[in-house]
Image (cartoon, grey):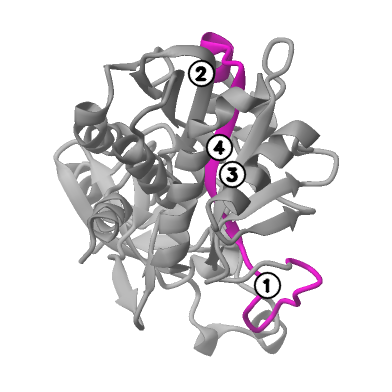
């Protein structure tokens, strides 16, 4: 197993829903410490790892948090009702095995709902909504659940582990954006003679409003920023390439614009910088013009007087599910492209 794949597996199997990123933050701290001059956690919880140099000052960002759930109510029989943390499509939740993260350790449960055998015909024609689902953790009463440490506010994540698919594919939970985090760690490891000051920021609470990206960009106020992310593809059944002209195996994705008016339109000189870095180093790349979805770049570029910002993403299938699929060669090329871009960033100034 390659070093990068081993790192991705560790990060994917770690648990850190938005607002509860501590375990992931410590893991990343241990990984990046040998490659940077300074490392700290800010008041929001963002991990900021810095390689000191001259100007310009560049911010590299990837978010640590993953989508998950939070316990809302425990009924008399010990069943848990929940709210979503981050963007779930309700149908992907049903019948998942989950981990409830209590003060005393992991408690396991499954998401259940009214069985189809008891549904009326019109009910069976409709998807089950999250509000009609619950978690069965084997408790027999509210008191039983509380004795296990489960109560309102308990964070919940998917109980699924990273696996290899085929020759070069992988699947796992939280690859949005632990894939981006793995890329950023690899970038810090590979960077050698970089004259710029580089702030690698592993942000919190991206999935619930881009919060860590907002505060860290305000505090650092870099000259330029680059976000390491994942993005969905149009190369599998159920979607057409005209709706997302990106494919797994065709290299990293350079964002041109996303989310129509709500996201980012990457400045021309930043786009040219990233494309030139790819072409000069024979790195294949794809261009993304999106209509939905935002990244930390959407808020970073609006900080203070504005920060020129770009996005490099790894193409992935089934994002915002616990079975995201990506190709390791795309991840490797994403890291290589960011390294080459950082090495040539002085050409922008």
Q: Residues within 10 Å of mark 3 (few under 14, many from 20)?
A: many
Mark found first going from the N terminus, 2 or 4: 2
Figure check: 209 above or below 255? above
Identify the residue shown where x is 35% and y is 20%. Answer: 51
Tag 3's secondary structure? helix
Identify the residue shown where x is 31% and y is 74%. Answer: 164
Figure check: 274 above or below 144? above
Mark found first going from the N terminus, 3 or 2: 2
Asked if the residue under mark 1 is in contact with the one under mark 4, i.e. CB atoms within 8 Å, the reply is no
Mark found first going from the N terminus, 2 or 1: 2
Tag 2's secondary structure? helix
Q: Give the residue at mark 4.
A: 227
Q: Give the residue at mark 1.
A: 234
**Cα separation between marks 2 and 1:** 32 Å
Mark found first going from the N terminus, 3 or 1: 1
Asked if the residue under mark 1 is in contact with the one under mark 3, i.e. CB atoms within 8 Å, the reply is no
Residue 339 left/right relative to 293: left
**Cα separation between marks 4 and 1:** 22 Å
Q: Give the residue at mark 2.
A: 216
**Cα separation between marks 3 and 1:** 25 Å
Highlighted range, magenta:
216-244
Q: Quadrant of residue 308?
A: top right
Q: Nearer the viewer, residue 179 or 345?
A: 345
Mark found first going from the N terminus, 4 or 3: 4
Q: Give the residue at mark 3.
A: 277
**Cα separation between marks 3 and 2:** 26 Å
Identify the residue shown where x is 23% and y is 55%. Answer: 3
Q: Is residue 332 magenta?
A: no
């Amino acid at each position: 197993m390659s070093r990068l794949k081993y790192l991705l597996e560790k990060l994917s199997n770690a648990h850190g829903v938005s607002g509860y990123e501590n375990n992931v933050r410590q893991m990343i701290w241990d990984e990046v410490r040998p490659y940077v001059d300074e490392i700290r956690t800010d008041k929001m919880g963002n991990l900021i790892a810095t390689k000191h140099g001259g100007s310009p000052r560049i911010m590299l960002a990837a978010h640590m948090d993953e989508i998950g759930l939070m316990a809302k109510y425990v009924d008399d029989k010990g069943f848990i009702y929940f709210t979503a943390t981050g963007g779930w499509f309700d149908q992907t939740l049903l019948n998942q095995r989950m981990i409830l993260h209590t003060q005393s350790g992991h408690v396991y449960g499954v998401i259940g709902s009214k069985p189809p055998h008891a549904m009326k015909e019109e009910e069976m024609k409709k998807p089950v909504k999250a509000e009609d689902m619950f978690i069965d953790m084997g408790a027999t009463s509210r008191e039983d659940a509380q004795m296990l440490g489960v109560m309102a506010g308990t964070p919940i994540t998917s109980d699924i582990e990273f696996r290899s698919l085929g020759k070069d594919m992988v699947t796992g939970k939280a690859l949005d954006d632990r894939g981006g985090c793995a890329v950023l760690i690899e970038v810090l490891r590979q960077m050698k003679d970089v004259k710029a000051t580089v702030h690698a920021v592993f942000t919190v609470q991206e999935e619930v409003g881009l919060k860590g990206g907002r505060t860290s960009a305000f505090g650092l106020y870099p000259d330029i920023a680059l976000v390491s992310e994942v993005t969905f593809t149009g190369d599998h059944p159920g979607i057409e390439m005209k709706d997302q002209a990106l494919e797994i195996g065709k290299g990293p994705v350079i964002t041109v614009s996303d989310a129509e008016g709500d996201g980012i339109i990457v400045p021309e000189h930043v786009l040219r910088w990233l494309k030139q870095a790819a072409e000069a180093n024979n790195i294949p790349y794809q261009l993304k013009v999106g209509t939905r979805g935002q990244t930390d770049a959407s808020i970073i570029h609006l900080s203070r007087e504005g920060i020129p910002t770009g996005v490099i993403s790894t193409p992935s299938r089934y994002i915002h599910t616990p079975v995201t699929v990506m190709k390791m060669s795309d991840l490797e090329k994403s890291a290589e492209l960011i390294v080459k871009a950082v090495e040539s960033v002085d050409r922008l100034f």
